[in-house]
Image (cartoon, helix red, strand yellow):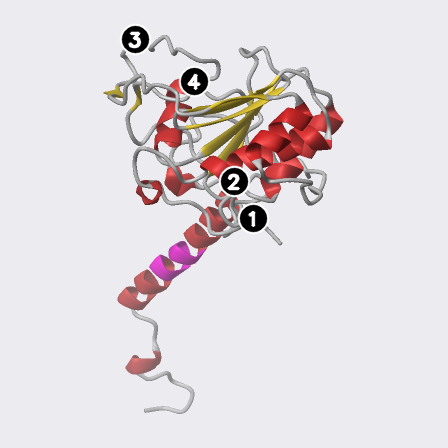
Amino acid sequence: MAEGTASPESKPTKAGYLIGAVFLLFIIAGVYIALGSGGDDGGSAHISSASGSSNELSPDDREGTPYEPPQSIDLATAAAAAKCVVHEDLPEEGHDHLSPEDTRPSYGTVPPTSGDHIGPPLQQADGAWADPAAQVAVVHSLEHGRIAIQYSPNLAEADQLALKGLYDSAYSASLLFPNPDMPYAAAATSWRNLIACPEWQGQKTLDAINAFGVAHWGHGREPMEGFPALSGPSFGEPAS
């Protein structure tokens, strides 16, 4: 063979080009998925896409004000200090799955804590959301042990960021979103439990909601593992 002439083995084949192209597509797809998901921790909104659906809500990726250690994690003590009302062991209003076309139930509490709810995979995914979440989707999340922190859209921006900071300290298997349909400054729900805070009392309100989360996180009707949560701090194991 003449000098400078490539051997047949050194020439790229069509199969080689195809394999290379497929490999490159896998790399691009992986980068795209990682960027779109916000990384391993779900981004600053801590979205767990494996736990449910976004239902076209926008993530709340604001930087929260760091939550100071609570004065008390005893629910009765913290709720009384914040002038919040706690309802525990409420009657179960149902637990059947609904399709998107079904009539929405009239829940007995505001916000609701149990009742028939949307079927999977349309349960509201764990995370901080900038838009109001449909309660028919949230109730299914509560059934699987979640805590749903809710606040009035009229709450001052600084107070919303304080709630976001509390959420950031215990985001695993929890939700945060505005609720324009309740008469409270802030509230939190779990399956068959509710804390309602008519007025914002600063750190006292945060401590009351935190104590509610500590008392009721993970106590749903169905196993929490049914909806995979992000690893990280939770009301069951808060950040140190």
**Marks 3, 1: nearer the viewer:** 1
Frontmost residue, 29 versus 118: 118
Give the quadrant of the N terminus.
bottom left
**Could you tell me which secondary element the residue under label 2 belongs to?**
helix
Closer to the chain start, of discs 2 and 3, is 3
Q: Are marks 3 and 1 in contact (CB under 8 Å)?
A: no
| Magenta-drawn stretch contains 182 | no
Magenta portion: prevailing SS class:
helix
Residue drawn at (48%, 17%) of the image: 111
Secondary structure at numbered mark 3: loop
Depth check, mark 4 against mark 3: the one in front is 4
Q: Marks 2 and 1: in contact by CB < 8 Å?
A: yes
* Badge 3 density bin: few <14, some 14–19, many ≥20, Cα 10 Å: few
Q: Position of residue 13 (x, y in %)?
A: 30, 69
Residue 112: mark in rendering: 4
Q: CA distance from mark 4 to mark 3?
A: 16 Å
Looking at the rendered structure, the kind of residue marked 1 is Pro
Please report the residue visible at 38 percent of the width from the left and 19 percent of the height from the top: 136
> What amino acid type is highlighted by mark number 2?
Val
Going from N to C along the chain, the mark reached first, 4 or 3, is 3
Task: Indicate which disc, 2 or 4, sits on the residue closer to the N terminus.
Answer: 4
x%, y% of residue 126?
A: 46, 36
